[in-house]
Image (cartoon, rainbow, N blue to C red):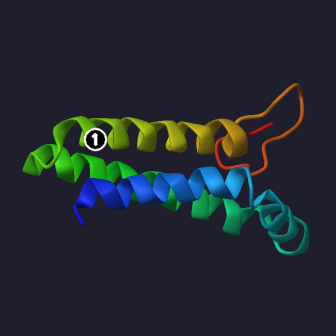
Amino acid sequence: MSIPVWGLILQVLFILVISIFNNIRIFVLEHFSVYPVALFELFLGLVSFVCGIYGIIKRVNPLLSILVSLFGVLICLYFVIVYLLPEAGIPPAIPWFYSE
């Protein structure tokens, strides 16, 4: 199995985590912290992005590699928007870039 396909599998896992298995995600958020969920989602985005870039460099299925890397960037942007940016006066879930 090629590396971009592994990135695609990780992206499907991301979609499943935020849709079908959202109750597990909420359980972890309520009982532990926001950090495991956020870092797991960031890990999925970064690794899938790296798989896509590797596929582009090695010229393994170029169209799939480009799509995997673009969707990896979108997952990373999702992480930034959901966990690092404040919304309507509510402080962010992970206060790394926010100072008030």
Left or right position of 7 against 30: left
Up/down of 34 relative to 91, above or below: below
Q: How many marks?
A: 1
Task: From the image, tell me which residue sits under label 1.
Answer: 64
Amino acid type, callout 1: Leu
Up/down of 67 relative to 53, above or below: above
The residue depicted at 28 percent of the width and 53 percent of the height is: 4
The residue depicted at 81 percent of the width and 70 percent of the height is: 28
The residue depicted at 44 percent of the width and 39 percent of the height is: 71
Up/down of 83 relative to 22, above or below: above
Left or right position of 85 against 7: right
The residue depicted at 34 percent of the width and 41 percent of the height is: 69
Mark 1 Cα-neighbour bin, 10 Å: few <14, some 14–19, many ≥20 = some
Dividing the picture into quadrants, the one containing residue 88 is: top right
Which quadrant of the rendered structure holds the N terminus?
bottom left
Q: Where is residue 68 drawn, in percent x and y?
A: 36, 43
